[in-house]
């Protein structure tokens, strides 16, 4: 299922932080959202998983305005890994993941064999199947993250919305998670701070700056040295990754760039 975000505005207590964002997350593609701190990535994602209501504009799921769907209907289609990662579940790992099946159950209905298979597969996908009996609150930050991702997988959604899913993960688990997203081929909308990971894993990228999408397109067309200077305020060269051929952004960690105003950034929409 495809997601269309049209002229989205979102405000907190009257302060608009997403202002007229447009983007498409195409069916079966990984669509990345990148941008500096505070640019509005989490806020935009929160409207897609219905944690926040837009003040104007809309989010369409396969052409239907999300607001026309009930909470249960949208939970069958859209699963999220939010940035607010619950830490207060006095539940086992397996029970947390099984919560992903809730949208499919009638009140008080128990698990059936199909639910148990889906939960087991989700736990195996994130490499937590050997820890299913542990208490969620006893896990490390990265382990919790993987369990909450398994809960999203157990929801068997058409669309995955992931807010910085690689946060807290060691490099091996980052690579595994991103590879897993690629093999699943679900419609995925994901925010990432790691621009090299975004360049490798995303089919398309949207760059948010001060609440607006300032560049969109294939990673190679979007992640240019000029954009890195103007939006992120850093100096960088873009080369070919020696192992994969993906764009590899080599940052100058010694000094920031003199950032140009964001208005100087051209919006890219091509390949
Ligand atoms: N719950 C909230 N109440 C009020 N303002 C908020 C709230 N959450 C975010 N903001 C503000 O909205 C703006 C956008 O924040 P948001 O978290 O969407 O940015 P982000 O791009 O995800 O940032 P980061 O990269 O730091 O996670 C920021 O100015 C932030 O301070």
Image (cartoon, rainbow, N blue to C red):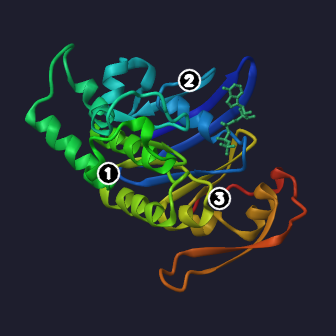
Helix, strand or loop for disc 1: loop
Mark drawn on residue 128? 1
Helix, strand or loop for disc 2: loop
- In the rendered image, is residue 34 in sight? yes
Residue positioned most to the right: 258
Between marks 2 and 1, how big is the CA–CA gap?
Answer: 31 Å
> Could you tell me which residue is drawn at 37 percent across and 43 percent down?
147
Q: Where on the picture, by quarter, is residue 46?
A: top right
Sort mark 2 into few (<14), some (14-19) or many (20+) by Cα contacts within 10 Å: some
Q: How many marks?
A: 3
| Near-viewer residue (143 or 45) | 143
Please determine whether, in this image, residue 97 is positioned above or below residue 170: above
| Near-viewer residue (140 or 42) | 140
Q: Are marks 2 and 1 in contact (CB under 8 Å)?
A: no
Between marks 2 and 3, how big is the CA–CA gap?
Answer: 28 Å
Please determine whether, in this image, residue 220 is positioned above or below residue 94: below
**Residue 4 percent coordinates (x, y):** 48, 38
> Could you tell me which residue is drawn at 31 percent across and 43 percent down?
153
Question: Which callout, 2 or 3, points to the residue nearer the camera?
Answer: 2
> Could you tell me which residue is drawn at 49 percent across and 52 percent down?
31
Ligand 1 near label 3 (Cβ, under 8 Å)?
no
Between marks 3 and 1, how big is the CA–CA gap?
Answer: 40 Å
Instruction: Name the residue beneath numbered marker 2.
Output: 52
Question: Which callout, 3 or 1, points to the residue nearer the camera?
Answer: 1
> Could you tell me which residue is drawn at 15 percent across and 22 percent down?
110
Q: Are marks 3 and 1 in contact (CB under 8 Å)?
A: no
Quadrant containing the N terminus is top left
**In screen coordinates, is 66 left or right of 210?**
left
Question: Which callout, 2 or 1, points to the residue nearer the camera?
Answer: 1
Mark drawn on residue 268? 3
């Amino acid at each position: 299922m495809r997601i269309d975000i049209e002229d989205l505005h979102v405000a907190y207590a009257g302060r608009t932080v997403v202002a007229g964002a447009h983007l498409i997350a195409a069916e079966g593609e990984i669509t990345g959202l990148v941008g500096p701190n505070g640019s509005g990535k989490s806020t935009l994602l929160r409207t897609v998983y219905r944690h926040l209501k837009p003040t104007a504009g809309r989010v369409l799921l396969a052409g239907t305005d999300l607001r026309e769907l009930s909470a249960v209907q949208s939970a069958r289609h859209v699963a999220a890994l939010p940035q607010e990662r619950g830490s207060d579940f006095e539940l086992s790992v397996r029970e947390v993941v099984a919560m992903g099946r809730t949208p499919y159950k009638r009140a008080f209905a128990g698990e059936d064999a199909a639910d148990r298979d889906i939960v087991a597969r989700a736990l195996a996908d994130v490499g937590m199947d050997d820890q299913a009996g542990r208490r969620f609150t006893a896990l490390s930050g990265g382990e919790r993250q993987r369990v909450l991702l398994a809960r999203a997988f157990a929801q068997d959604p058409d669309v995955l919305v992931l807010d910085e899913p690689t946060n807290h993960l060691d490099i091996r688990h980052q690579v595994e998670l991103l590879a897993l997203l690629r093999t699943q081929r679900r419609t995925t909308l994901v925010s990432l701070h790691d621009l090299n990971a975004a360049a490798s894993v995303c089919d398309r990228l949207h760059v948010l700056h001060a609440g607006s999408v300032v560049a969109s397109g294939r990673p190679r067309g979007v992640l240019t040295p000029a954009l890195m200077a103007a939006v992120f305020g850093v100096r960088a060269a873009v080369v070919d990754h020696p192992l994969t051929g993906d764009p590899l952004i080599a940052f100058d960690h010694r000094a920031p760039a003199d950032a140009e105003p964001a208005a100087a950034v051209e919006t890219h929409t091509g390949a």
